Image (cartoon, helix red, strand yellow):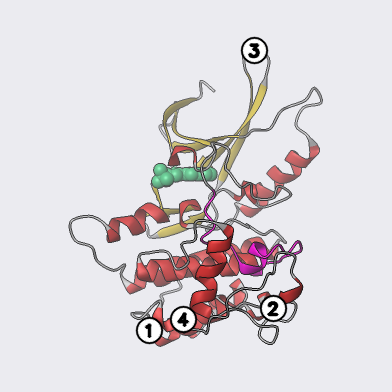
């Protein structure tokens, strides 16, 4: 990997081993993601090949972090590791929102920024879903932002297929549950694109509030945060919920109304959010349909 000068680790292990690096020959900045893939004597396992070709296909979208190359490196000890080389963006949405929450002058994110970032997130997600790929772990930490160009791109799609999202990340970092859909928390085994739409709704509300919508610190607490705001789900509004594996008798909370959580959000925005934060995954708006919602009419979609 002498082609690259490793600069610093980014995201402190949130993403596994990802380094900011410079291409020695051109000075171009890249993100080097070291995969945990153990190479056997036959070379790259077919599952990994499929994963990588899927990544290449998906990263053709402007709204997904571009995979520039895949580098195979055999270390002196004979072990072969695979590096994924991605385009570099200077920050992620978590840090971007923190910048508006903390700092000398806490202030809301400009409405147009929220609208533009949400539109780009829906567009990138619609691209994945159109190729039958779920992300399964959308959260502000793996949405990268180019502040200058006002771009938002989905990163870390590596978790999307086959592997279930681990409880602890590679570096024993706690995997956040804040964006996890209720059907996943209730142990559904077959879930669909709706899991990503729920996450997008939580991220939308967080950009407006500058604090998480449902900040649970355990699977049970995560559910109770959701129930306390939306009301404990009923069979009427979510047919089949009582049959989910981890369903128990929960206290019966009444809906508080989503508006209470995002009092500053304009009517169109609240309407779109309420179509994303629906208990029944079948009732959630699709990423593609969301892009046509009136909330985006004031956005310059050029
Ligand atoms: N969290 S951070 O330091 O602002 C920052 C993270 C990144 C990342 N870029 C990539 C690209 C691909 C996969 C994961 C990551 S994480 C670039 S800057």
Q: Residue at x 53, y 80 (%)?
A: 253
Mark number, residue 282:
2
Front disc: 2 or 4: 4
Q: Position of residue 161 (x, y in %)?
A: 71, 51
Q: Secondary structure beneath disc 3?
A: loop
Q: Residues within 10 Å of mark 1 (few under 14, many from 20)?
A: few
The count of marks equals 4
Is residue 17 among the parts visible in the rendering? yes
Q: Residue furthest left?
A: 104
Residue density around tag 2, few if under 14, some if 14–19, many if 20 or more, within 10 Å: few
Residue beneath the point at 73% across and 39% down: 48
From the viewer's side, name the closer residue of 298 and 252: 252
In the image: residue 302, left or right of residue 1: left
Residue marked by disc 1: 266
Compute the Cα span from label 2 to label 3.
51 Å
Give the extent of the magenta segment. 175-194
- Which SS class for mark 4? helix
Measure the C-alpha gap from mark 4 to mark 1.
12 Å
C-alpha distance separating marks 1 and 3: 59 Å
Residue 77 numbered mark, or none: 3
- Which of discs 2 and 1 lies nearer the camera? The answer is 2
Residue 195 is drawn in which quadrant? bottom right
Mark found first going from the N terminus, 3 or 4: 3
Residue 116: x and y, percent?
42, 69
Q: Which badge, 2 or 1, is on the more N-terminal residue?
A: 1
Residue 111 image offset from top left, x and y in percent: 34, 74
């Amino acid at each position: 990997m002498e082609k690259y000068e490793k600069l610093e680790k980014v995201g402190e292990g949130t993403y596994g081993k990802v380094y900011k690096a410079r291409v020695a020959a051109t000075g171009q900045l890249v993100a080097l993601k070291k995969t945990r893939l153990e190479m056997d004597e036959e070379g790259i396992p077919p599952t990994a090949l499929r994963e990588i070709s899927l990544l290449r296909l998906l990263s053709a979208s402007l709204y997904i972090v571009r995979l520039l190359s895949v580098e195979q490196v055999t270390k002196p000890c004979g072990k072969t590791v695979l590096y994924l080389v991605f385009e570099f963006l200077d920050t992620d949405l978590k840090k971007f929102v923190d910048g508006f929450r903390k700092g000398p002058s806490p202030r809301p994110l400009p409405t147009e920024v929220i609208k533009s970032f949400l539109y780009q997130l829906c567009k990138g997600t619609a691209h994945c879903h159109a190729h039958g790929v779920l992300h399964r772990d959308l959260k502000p930490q793996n949405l990268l932002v180019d502040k200058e160009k006002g771009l938002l791109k989905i990163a870390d799609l590596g978790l999307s297929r086959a592997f279930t999202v681990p409880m602890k990340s590679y570096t024993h970092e706690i995997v956040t549950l804040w964006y996890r859909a209720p059907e996943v928390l209730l142990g559904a085994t077959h879930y669909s694109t709706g899991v990503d739409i729920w996450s997008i709704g939580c991220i939308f509300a967080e950009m407006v509030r500058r604090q998480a919508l449902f900040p649970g610190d355990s699977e049970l607490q995560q559910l109770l945060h959701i129930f306390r705001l939306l009301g404990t789900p009923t069979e009427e509004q979510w047919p089949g919920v009582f049959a989910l594996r981890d369903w128990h008798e929960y206290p019966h909370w009444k809906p508080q109304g989503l508006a209470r959580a995002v009092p500053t959000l304009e009517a169109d925005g609240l309407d779109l959010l309420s179509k994303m934060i629906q208990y029944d995954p079948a009732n959630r708006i699709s990423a593609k349909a969301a892009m046509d919602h009136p909330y985006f009419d004031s956005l310059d979609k050029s």
